[in-house]
Amino acid sequence: MQKTDWHRVVVFKPGLRDAVMSYLKKGQRTMITGKITYGEITDQEGKQRGTTSIIADDVIFLQN
């Protein structure tokens, strides 16, 4: 059985961002290198929620 984990990835580098937007498809496997950041948001009910994101330095598209 294969397990899938989902992560929020943020891409700021313009060239990398354009490649991700053009070529990455939902469900496609990738290898991401970057920094993990933690923060908080306020949801629609006014509750504070913790967030975790990966700020991508590099994205490698893998074959499925």
Image (cartoon, grey):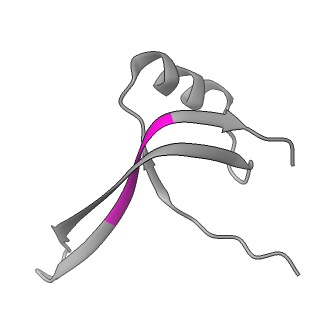
Looking at the picture, does residue 64 appear above or below residue 12?
Answer: below
Number of disc labels: 0
Q: Which residue is drawn at 69% across and 41% down?
A: 25
The range drawn in magenta is: 52-57
Looking at the picture, does residue 30 appear above or below residue 36?
Answer: above
**Picture coordinates of residue 60 (x, y %)?**
67, 35
Does the magenta segment cover residue 5? Answer: no
Q: Is the magenta stretch mostly helix, strand or loop?
A: strand
Q: Which residue is drawn at 42% across and 35% down?
A: 11
Looking at the picture, does residue 7 appear above or below residue 30?
Answer: below
Q: Looking at the rendering, which quadrant does residue 13 occupy?
A: top left
**Picture coordinates of residue 27 (x, y %)?**
72, 54
Answer left or right for 64 relative to 22. Answer: right
Q: Which residue is drawn at 45% across and 40% down?
A: 56
Tell me the quarter of the image containing the N terminus.
Answer: bottom right
Q: Nearer the viewer, residue 31 or 12?
A: 31
